[in-house]
């Protein structure tokens, strides 16, 4: 034991010199994003919206994004896309979606009687058929309720709509809330 401590003490002055000669660590390129993984790019309260994006896995359109209103009563004070501007990348797709509307809508749901929280990718069911998937969820400590966020068909995304979420093999009722559940008028932000 003493011998190894003596050897360590003798080598200690050489360690900084060795560290100076060591090249910077080379890290592997990060793992690619999962197809369909939804990202909130930015919450923009002054515009009553958030930017959402997701990788599609399609080589022709690898990424999609949309500006989603956070509240029907909120009056936006900003615009995101100038449709009159010519030549920007994705203009034709943006015009087509503006005309037809989005196929899916991101909603927040209150999960009833949840003693277990969602983690993501659980099925959102309507009348026995899978209509969407959960992207994330957690217990909302400020409001005292279990929440799940996910995508459902735009035609079904209305306040009070009821779905079922398969959480660990048990179907739990989930109710859509289109208004923010905590501080919907943004009064705490402005106080």
Image: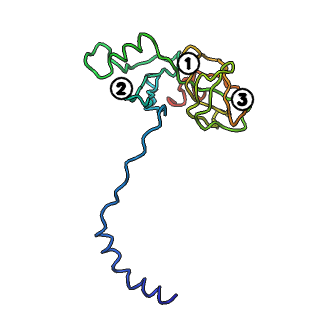
* Helix, strand or loop at mark 3: strand
Mark closest to the chain's N terminus, 3 or 1: 1
- The number of numbered discs placed on residues in the rendered structure image is 3
User: Disc 3 to disc 1, how far (Cα)?
Assistant: 19 Å
Residue at (68% x, 18% y) in the render: 127
Residue at (52% x, 87% y) in the render: 1
Closer mark to the observer between disc 3 and disc 2? 2
* Helix, strand or loop at mark 1: strand
For disc 1, the neighbor class at 10 Å (few under 14, some 14 to 19, many from 20) is some
User: Disc 3 to disc 2, how far (Cα)?
Assistant: 37 Å
Residue 171 in the image: above or below residue 119? above
Query: Where does label 1 land, which residue?
Result: 153
* Helix, strand or loop at mark 2: loop
**Numbered tag placed on residue 60 in the rendering:** 2
Place of residue 123 in the rendered image (x, y in percent of width and height, measured from the top left):
62, 29
Mark closest to the chain's N terminus, 2 or 1: 2
Picture quarter containing residue 143?
top right
Query: Where does label 3 land, which residue?
Result: 171
In the picture as drawn, the residue positioned furthest to the top comes out as: 99
Place of residue 167 in the rendered image (x, y in percent of width and height, measured from the top left):
68, 34
Mark closest to the chain's N terminus, 3 or 2: 2
Place of residue 136 in the rendered image (x, y in percent of width and height, measured from the top left):
57, 34
User: Disc 2 to disc 1, how far (Cα)?
Assistant: 23 Å
**Numbered tag placed on residue 57 in the rendering:** none
């Amino acid at each position: 034991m003493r011998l190894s401590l003596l050897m360590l003490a003798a080598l200690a002055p050489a360690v900084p010199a060795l560290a100076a000669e060591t090249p910077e660590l080379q890290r592997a390129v990060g793992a690619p994003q999962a197809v369909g993984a939804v990202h909130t790019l930015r919450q923009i309260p002054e515009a009553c919206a958030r930017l959402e994006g997701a990788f599609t896995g399609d080589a022709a359109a690898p990424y999609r994004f949309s500006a989603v209103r956070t509240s029907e009563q909120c009056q936006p004070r900003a615009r995101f896309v100038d449709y009159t501007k010519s030549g920007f990348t994705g203009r034709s797709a943006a015009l087509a979606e503006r005309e037809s509307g989005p196929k899916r809508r991101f909603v927040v749901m209150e999960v009833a009687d949840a003693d277990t929280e969602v983690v993501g990718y659980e099925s959102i069911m309507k009348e026995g058929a899978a209509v969407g998937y959960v992207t994330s969820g957690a217990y909302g400590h400020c409001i005292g309720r279990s929440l799940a966020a996910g995508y459902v068909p735009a035609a079904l995304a209305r306040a009070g709509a009821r779905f079922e979420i398969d959480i660990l093999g048990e179907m739990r009722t989930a109710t859509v809330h289109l208004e923010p559940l905590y501080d919907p008028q943004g009064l705490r932000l402005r106080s």
